[in-house]
Amino acid sequence: MSTASIVKTRAGKRIDAWRWGGRIFLVMMLLYTAVPMAWMLLTSIKSGFAAMQLPPQWFPNEPTLASYEKLLDPTNSVGQDFLRFFWNSLFVSTTTTMLAVAVAVPAAYAFSRFDFPGRKFLFFAVLLRNMFPAVIFLVPLFILMRLLGLVNTHGSLILTYLTFGLPLAIWLLKGFYDNIPYQLEQAARIDGATRFQAFFLIVMPLSAPGIIATAIYSFIGAWNEYIFAYTFLNKNEQLTLPVGIQRFFSENTTDFPGLMAASFIMSLPVVVLFLLLQRYFVRALTEGAVKH
Amino acid sequence: MAHVVLENLVKTYGAFTAVNNVSLKVEDGEFVALVGPSGCGKTTTLNLVAGLIPVTSGEIAIGDHVVNDMDPKDRNIAMVFQNYALYPQKSVYKNLAFPLQMRKLPRDEIDRKVREAARVLDMTHLLERKPRELSGGQQQRVALGRALVRDPAVFLMDEPLSNLDAKLRVQMRSEIKRFHQDLKATIIYVTHDQLEAVTMADKMAVMNGGFLQQYDSPAQVFAHPVNMFVASFIGSPAMSLIPLEASTVDGQTVLTGAEGWTMALSPLNARKVQRSTTRKIVLGARHSTIKLAKNASPNAIPAKAYTVEPTGDVTFVQALLSGAVVNISVPPNVAIAPDEQIWLEFDQERIHLFDGATELALKAD
């Protein structure tokens, strides 16, 4: 009896140690990710002078929203550029997202429900694209875009982002459709629905969380993408935010509060989207992991 | 309501034949159970009738219409699924209303029919709930309600009770039977549980390996199984099947067991045995038709008790005979110990004889 209790306490202590180790690790990770963001936010409300001070002011003595006002004011050149980049990014990301969802929904459904020749091969091919680092495709895609006359158009970016986003979108959504019992569609068809109605009225609403997650995923991917945007576009009025911010501020000396304010505004849509829809997102990534 | 006719129905998947030349007629208002072990083709047959999978060859008629090329929605059928297939995002009310909405009925008529169905199935208080907030039995009831809400020509039920616990299953069994009696509905009911088929159905179609084995009333199937498969599948505990050898001793046809004992046959049974294609005969006997004695008697065959299973109102004794396990039921007050010497007497009027090669029941003429 005594040995058993000793073993028990030992095991208990070991678990405790692991648990505390885990907590400390998580706190470190939190600091690692949160501190730069906090610093970004704090710098963005400093004056240009305060931002360069050494030792640094941890919290600005005279917080100011001047940088934000400058960026969002369409009457000065800085604001004009920034708002244009923002609009460009929004356009490219939204179009990519809509196209990705429009193609991924029927594609994923087909992969999930139908048995057609070459189904396995095609599904593998869809994933193959994502097994290589993006840089490998940079030069070939640039040549291709030049041939297609798409260099310096947003079309080049949308096409490129789709080739990255679609496979994952299809993969994610297929998991969702796999989890929706086929009998639901059969029941709907017996209840008087056509095949399409069964999909549209029964399956689509059930897969809404998956579709939302897929949309967020494509949007974030397109919104943050830098390398392709940097390579394919060089006219100022075409640039998307990541490239625009970088190029813009390296040209106009280094305005750190301005840069940080721009970065903050750029991260807002993603954060807001994520906060609003995070429960769908988490569900989508775990759905299909276990069979109910 | 309508009758359903299957004629030479075949469904193949590549080289595999799931349904092999099945023909049967379900009369108007009849409750027919398709019964058989897993993979026997019963569910495939039901899905063919529903139109959920295309027919390879043969014909399906519902009422007076051949429906082979009709969409499920145009066949005027309702189906209850094993996993109920309730629409999870819809309330019970909307689940019941869905088939009516699809038929574009006016809103007030839909409301009237949904409430009527809910009243019949005693679930008016559940109408606003979502399926996940219901118990298994309640979900089952909603599935039934969704089927009955629109007066279909035929009800198709695919193992509707197999996801319920034992007690609820017995209760729902009698509810579905009652439902059939009240509505005079034509029902095709798939189950792997022969007890469900025997207790509920007007007729049962026993299937195995894609073939229809026997199609008759439960009483007939029980009393006159056409082959060894049906004999062993229907009835619980299963009919004991004992492989024996036929021979003629002094002009009398007898069966000999592996242990060397012989059993004399009645003239009728002797005629049956003479029609066998082989000397190998399989003797079938249900547990209740075998008489067990503790002492030897002229016609009794010696055996040893193997296990004894008291169930309360009846005790089942298993004995080994000629390499087969024989089930015998005795009253609970008969005390038998394992390995005890017993004598078994078979009722010549009630034994079944099968051809050892073809496995078909032997007939006297």
Image (tube, coloured by chain):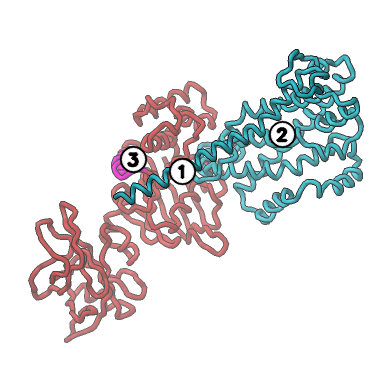
Identify residue for label 2. Answer: A220
- The first of marks 1 and 2 along the sequence is 1
Q: Which residues are magenta?
A: B164-175
Q: Amino acid at mark 3?
A: Ile
> Are dots 1 and 2 on a single chain?
yes
> Are dots 3 and 1 on a single chain?
no
**Where residue B77 is drawn, which disc sits there?**
none
When asked about the image quadrant of residue A168, the answer is: top right
Contact, CB < 8 Å: mark 3 with mark 1? no
Secondary structure state at the residue bearing disc 3: helix
Residue at 80% across, 37% down: A226
Gap in Å between the C-alphas at discs 3 and 1? 54 Å
Identify residue for label 1. Answer: A15
Residue at 31% across, 47% down: B200
Q: Amino acid at mark 1?
A: Ile
> Are dots 2 and 3 on a single chain?
no
Residue at 21% across, 72% down: B268
Q: Amino acid at mark 2?
A: Ile
Colour for chain A in the figure: cyan
Secondary structure state at the residue bearing disc 2: helix
